[in-house]
Image (cartoon, rainbow, N blue to C red):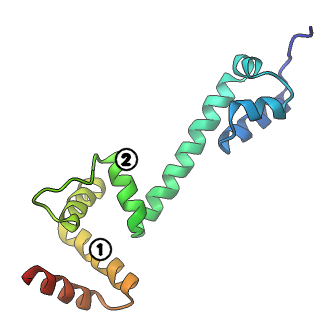
Amino acid sequence: MTRHKPTEEARARVAALACKGATHRDIARAIDTSVNTLRRYYRRELDQGEALANIDIAGVLYSKAMAGDLTACIFWLKCRAGWCDRPDSLSDQERAVISMVRLTGLSPASVREGLLHWAAKELQTTPKAVAAIEQKAARQ
């Protein structure tokens, strides 16, 4: 049996595939070797590729959350800030504001204003109208 000899081309391919989230099994097939050989000779490329993929995805998620994507905000808060769906005395909006204040370092007023602008955009209305709806709901 011939001993595997890694090439720079193979290293680059392993790193690129790992960065795209390919499984070790699929990467091994792509370079025509076994999973054990892949892990033995390409450990650094596998680890770095996976880390770079996670960093890239986290960056996209962070950007979406900071741009007001509510789903991204909630996902980030649940995964990174310990936020969970449990009933307590705070409303969902209050919990979101508190978590975003902690996450961004912005003032509660700035976060609330940003959420009002996002809600207005989603509802195709103005932040003032959203605030009025919010106040009416709070009185009921």
Residue at screen point 54% across, 51% down = 57
Q: Position of residue 31 (x, y in %)?
A: 84, 31
Amino acid on which the number 2 mark rests in the picture: Cys
Q: Residue at x 19, y 71 (%)?
A: 109
Residue where numbered disc 1 is placed: 115
Mark pair 1, 2: CA separation: 20 Å
Q: Position of residue 34 (x, y in %)?
A: 79, 21
Mark 1 residue crowding within 10 angstroms, few (<14) / some (14–19) / many (20+): many
Amino acid type at image mark 1? Leu
Q: Which residue is mark 2?
A: 79
Q: Position of residue 135 (x, y in %)?
A: 13, 84
Q: Label 1's element?
A: helix
Q: Is residue 11 above or below residue 52?
A: above
Q: Which quarter of the image is occupied by the C terminus?
A: bottom left
Indicate left or right for 91 with 82 as reference.
left
Measuring from the top left, give residue 114's x and y in whole percent.
30, 74
Is tag 1's residue or tag 2's residue first in the polypeptide sequence? 2
